């Protein structure tokens, strides 16, 4: 739903890449895109309802694998991080854009399948996943065991704690139907177990999803703006209305409701300035009571 962007943002996003084209390739050489692994922690008591068992999540977004071998190699780095650091499950928030090249597509799917062998993979779709090869994308991802949640939910149990996982369709593509997978906040049983929500575009949380019961939301789409103004948290070309949500990491949107925003694995035009791509490992567990060590 592109009308959610301001006119200034729309014009900037449309014309800035063209105006910047002469310097983009130079910047790619002298300042190649960065990539970081973020570790975040969330106290279980901050959830609504609070969680009884610990949970470690790997959150990754915006792979844009159709951008060639470099994009596939970034996915390789994510799989290596998953193997090294471990998690109970991975949450992928869209914009896969599998390569058109049969060779690269096969490699990307092999890497995703390897990742699936390490932990369960749950995913929603991004706006770039609704292109002509949409059906093929769904078939290929499901074929390697990725559990796609498109306006649907499942319940899983990890370390004795039940968690509801919900994923919605894309906001810009008018495929967002939260009533199919989420309960209204005042509905009976809405807060009976913590709900993890996969949503590609963080704008949807403030514009459409506030009336619903969810505990931790995971999103991407903004790419961390790919450019952050130095010494600020301003992302002038981030494609979202709520610019502050482009900051990667945790955002408390309401009491008991937290957003985990990823800057994404891939890049637009292959350039990032002062805003590296990332994957996020989020650990949810109760912090030990420091008074307990004194007894």
Image (cartoon, grey):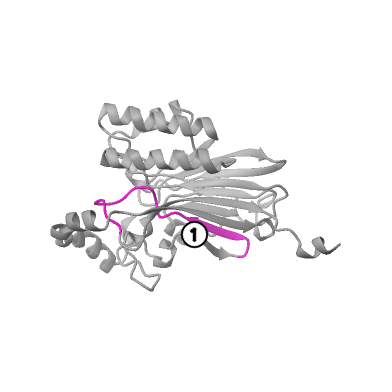
The quarter holding residue 143 reads top left
Q: In which quarter of the image is the C terminus?
A: bottom right
Q: Residue furthest left?
A: 22
Q: Can see residue 97?
A: no
What residue is rendered at 49% in x and 29% in y? 145
| Residue at 83% in and 64% down | 294
> Does dot 1 land on a helix, a strand or a loop?
strand
In this rendering, position of residue 131 left or right of residue 53: left
Residue 206 x/y as whole percent: 47, 62
> Closer to the camera, 186 or 279?
279
Asked if residue 9 lies left or right of residue 291, the reply is: left
Residue 163 x %, y %: 64, 44
Residue receiving disc 1 = 249
Q: Would residue 110 be seen by someone viewing this image from the given angle? A: yes
Q: Looking at this view, name the residue that lies furthest to the bottom.
A: 231
What residue range appears in magenta? 255-272
């Amino acid at each position: 739903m592109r009308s959610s962007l301001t006119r200034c943002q729309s014009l900037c996003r449309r014309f800035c890449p063209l105006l910047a084209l002469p310097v983009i390739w130079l910047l790619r050489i002298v300042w190649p895109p960065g990539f970081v692994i973020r570790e975040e922690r969330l106290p279980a008591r901050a959830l609504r309802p609070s969680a009884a068992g610990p949970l470690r999540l790997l959150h990754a977004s915006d792979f844009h694998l159709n951008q060639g071998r470099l994009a596939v190699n970034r996915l390789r780095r994510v799989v290596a991080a998953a193997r090294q650091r471990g998690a109970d499950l991975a949450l992928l928030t869209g914009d896969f854009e599998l390569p058109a090249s049969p060779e690269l597509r096969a490699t990307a799917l092999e890497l995703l399948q390897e990742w699936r062998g390490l932990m369960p993979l749950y995913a929603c779709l991004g706006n770039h996943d609704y292109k002509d090869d949409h059906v093929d994308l769904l078939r290929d991802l499901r074929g390697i065991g990725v559990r796609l949640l498109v306006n649907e939910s499942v319940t899983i149990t990890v370390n004795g704690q039940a968690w509801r996982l919900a994923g919605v369709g894309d906001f810009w593509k008018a495929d967002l139907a939260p009533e199919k997978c989420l309960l209204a906040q005042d509905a009976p049983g809405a807060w009976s177990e913590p709900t993890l929500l996969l949503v590609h575009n963080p704008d949807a949380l403030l514009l459409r999803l506030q009336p619903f019961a969810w505990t931790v939301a995971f999103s991407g789409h903004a790419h961390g703006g790919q450019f952050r103004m130095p010494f600020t948290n301003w992302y002038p070309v981030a494609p979202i209305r709520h610019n502050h949500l482009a900051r990667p990491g945790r955002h408390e949107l309401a009491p008991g409701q937290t957003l985990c925003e990823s800057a994404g694995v891939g890049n637009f035009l292959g350039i990032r300035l002062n805003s590296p791509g990332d994957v996020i490992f989020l650990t949810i567990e109760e912090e030990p009571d420091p008074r307990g060590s004194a007894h």
